[in-house]
Amino acid sequence: MPEFCDVAVPVPLDMAFTYRVPPGMMPVVGGRVLVPFRQQRMTGVVVELHDRKPSVTIKDVLSVLDSKPVLDDQLLRLGRWIAAYYLAPPGEVFRSMLPLMAEFKRAIGYRISEPGQKALHIAGTTGSSRRSHRSPEEQAKEIQVLDYLMGGDGEWIPEGTLRSSLGISRSVLENLLRKKWILRQDISAAQDATRTVKVAVLKSVDGKLNDNQRTLVDTLSAAGGRVPVESLRCLDIPRTSLGTLVKRGLIEIVAEPAGFAVSRSRPGSSPFDFEFNRAQQAALTRLREAVEARKFSGLLLHGVTGSGKTAVYLAGMRAVLAAGRSAILLVPEIGLTPAVAADLQQIFGDEVAILHSALSGRERAEQWHRIKRREARMVVGTRSAVFAPVEDLALIIVDEEHDASYKQEETPRYHARDVAVMRAKMANAAVVLGSATPSLESYFNARKNKYALIELPDRVEQRPLPEVEIVDMRLEFQETGHEQVISRKLAAEIKDRLDRREQVMVLLNRRGYSPVALCRTCGKKLECNNCAIALTHHKREHKMACHYCGSTAPVPRACVHCGSEYVYFLGTGSEKLEELLHGIFPQARIARLDRDTVRGHEDFERTLHALDEGELDMVVGTQMIAKGHDIHGVTLVGVVGADAALGLPDFRAAERTFQLLTQVAGRAGRGQTPGKVILQTYFQDHYAVQYAARQDFLGFYEKELQFRGWMHYPPYSALANVLVRSDRLDDALQWSGQMGKWFAQNRHEGVRVLGPAAAPILRLKRDYRYHFVLKSPSREKLNLTLRALLAYAAQQKIPRTQVIVDVDALWLM
Ligand SMILES: [Zn+2]
Ligand SMILES: [Zn+2]
C-alpha cells in the first residue's frame, strides 16, 4: 500500500492535500476518506496514491469510507477537466458530482432531560430558576431553549434548527449540557432518512383538558383523528400543549413517509402510440447509427416547436436500453413534472432513475446507488444528472440545450451541456443537443461540422406554424393618447377567442404588481437595502420584494427619503396584468403562472392540466408559460412584454429575446386549429423581434453572428467574467484596482481585458461588485491568464471566495 494519498476536500482552494495512510487502511483512488482539515473533519475524494514524502509535516487519514471507487476513472477525469476549464477548486467539483456527501455529514441533536423539565417547571412557577451567577439574559435564553425542546414531542432537535430558530450561541447549549438539563446525540443517520411527515394521532379523549389542549383534541377528532403536526402549528397554540398531551398518552406522534407523488392527472397513453413522420424517422436512424458506432459523435437536433423531438429522444433511449447499454436525458428544471416522471416510468419501468429537485439528499443518494448498481440504466434529470454513475454510457441527450438553467450559477460554474459533450467524448458515446432555438454556440459548431445537424422542419401532422402580427406600442400610444398595457388589437383578438371558446396565453416576463415605487416629490425610487435594485410591489401579499435577494419591506405610505406622500407605483408585472385582464374580461377564467403562484412542479402541472381540461380560458405569466407540454386548445398567444431585456447591457439579450419569443409563439395552434400570435413591442425594428415574428432562425442566426464577430463575443471568442465583491466598498474598490493594475502591467497576449468597471448591478446581496470581462480567440490563453490572475490575487491575500471567475458566463450583470 502506498504511504500517502492526495485528497480533494470541499474547500475554496485550487489544490488537493496530502495525508499519510496509517497501516491497515486501504483507501482507493476515486473513493472517499475522512480527514482532519484545519479544526474540522471533512469528507474528501482520493485523487492519487503515492510514496512521495512531502516536505511539510502531514496528518493521518482518519478513516476510509469506500472500499471501491464512487467516482470511476472517467468521472474523475471529467471532474479534473471541469476544475481546470472553469478554474474551480477540485474538492468543490467532486462534491457537486456526488450526492453522497450528506451520508457522512455529522449532525448533532438535542432533547430535554428529566432534570431539565423540572427546571423549566420551576422557572414557570417562580419566574426565575435557582439563584445563579448568570445574567438574566443568559437565564432567559436557557429557558427559551428548554421551552423549545419541551415542545419537540420528545424528538431530537438538530443543533442547526435550534440555533437558527432561537438565535443562540453554542455556549448556551454547553452550559445546559453541563447542568444535565439537556441531552445530546449524533443524529446523522436519522436526519437523512427518507423524508417523513409527522402526524398526530388521537388515542383517547378522557381526562381534564385546558383550553389549548381542548382545541387540539377537537381539531384532531374533527379531522378523523389524524392531522399532520405541521398543520396543528397553524392553530397558534404553544408547542408545550401538544407535548403534554403526548406525555399523557392522549395523542401519539407517528412518522409517515412523504414521498414524491407521481402524477395521477394524465391518461395512460404511451408516447409511442403515434407514428413517426419521415423527418422524425430519419433523425432516429441517424441517432441510432451514432450510438452503434461506439465512438464520439455530436448531433444537433434543430426541430421547430411541435416537431416531436421528445418522441425521437425516447425512441433512441429505448434502443440503447434494448442493447443493454446506458443513456442520460437532461431536461431543464421546470420541465421535469410528475406527469413527465409518470410517462417515463411507463416507458422504462424500473430501468429509469429520475433525479428531480423534490428529492431529499437521502433519496438522491438512493437513486445514485441504484444507478451505480446498474439497476437503472436510463437516467433522466436536471443539470447534475450529467454526473450519473452509469456504466457503458452510449447516449446523452440535452433537451432544450439553449436553456439557461443548465449553467450552474455557483461554484463550480459549469455548463451541463458542455460537460455532457466532454463526457460523451471520454465515453466514446453519442451526444444529442436538441432545441427549436439552438444556442449560437451550438449552431456555430454544427456549421463548422463539429456536430452533425439534423433538422425537423415541420410540425407533426403537418400542423401549420402560427401567424405572427406585430403591434408597435409607440404607435398605439400616439393613437390612443395614453400608455397601454393591452393594445386594442390584442384585446379584440382575445375577445374573439373567448367568444369561440378557445384558449389564450399572455406573456409578460416580469412578476409582481408594479416594478417601481417612485416618489413624485424627490424623484427617488424605493430600493432594496441589500441591492442596488428597485423593490417590486406585490399587491396580494401586500409587500415590497427584491427579486434578487428575496428581502421584503412594507408597502410605503410615504417616501422613505423625503417623507412625501406622493409615492406612485409604476409599470406592470404579471400580477397586475392578471387583474387588468379580469377587468376587461370579467367572465373569463384566468390563471397565472409565475414564481409567485408556482411553488413546485405540482402547481405548474395543475394549472397546465386545468388548461388542458378546458377548466381555464386564459393563462397569463412569465417565461414559465413558454415551457411545458403541448396545450391543444390555445389558439392565441399575446406577448405583452418580452423585449425589455433588449435595453440591457448584455450581449446575449438579443439571443435570449429571440428564443423566448419563438418558444412562446410555438405554444399557439398546436391542435387542429391554426394559431395566432400578437406581439406587442417598443422595439419594432429590432432584428430579434423581426426574425422571431417570421420564426426565421437562420436569418436571426446570420445577423447575430455578424454582430458577435464585430464585437469579438462568443462564439468567436472565449469569454470570462471576473467579479470582485465585498460587503465593504473600500475592499471591492481596492482589490479590483489592484487587479486592474496587474492587468495593465503584465502583457497577456491575445487576451482582451475590459475593466475594472462597476458591475451593472453595483450592489447585490450586500456586496459591492466590480468586474472585468476577458475575451480571447484562444481558450488556452484565456485560461492561462485567469490562472495567473488567481495566483496574483492569492499572493495579494485577496480572499478566494471574493473573486468569482465565471468562464463562458451567461450573465454579465
Ligand atoms: Zn421622496
Ligand atoms: Zn435585494
Image (cartoon, rainbow, N blue to C red):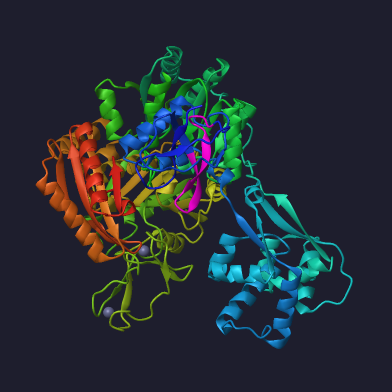
Residue closer to the observer: 207 or 596: 207
Q: Is residue 741 above or below residue 182?
A: above
Q: Residue at x 55, y 31 (%)?
A: 26
Can residue 330 be seen here? The reply is no
Q: Position of residue 786 (x, y in %)?
A: 23, 41
Residues shaded magenta: 27-44
Q: Is residue 406 above or below residue 549?
A: above
Q: Residue at x 52, y 55 (%)?
A: 589
Chief SS of the magenta region: strand
Residue found farthest to the right: 206
Q: Name which quarter of the figure residue 526 lies in.
A: bottom left
Residue 531 in the figure: left or right of residue 265 = left
Displayed-image quarter of ligand 2: bottom left
- Is 31 part of what is drawn in magenta? yes
Can residue 93 be seen here? The reply is yes
Residue found farthest to the bottom: 126
Residue closer to the observer: 373 or 564: 373
Q: Residue at x 12, y 44 (%)?
A: 746
Residue 71 in the figure: left or right of residue 718 = right
Q: Residue at x 73, y 53 (%)?
A: 255
- Is 351 part of what is drawn in magenta? no
Residue 441 in the figure: left or right of residue 685 = right
Residue closer to the observer: 18 or 242: 18
Q: Position of residue 411 (x, y in %)?
A: 38, 46
Q: Position of residue 613 (x, y in %)?
A: 58, 44
Residue closer to the observer: 513 or 39: 39
Q: Position of residue 501 (x, y in %)?
A: 51, 47
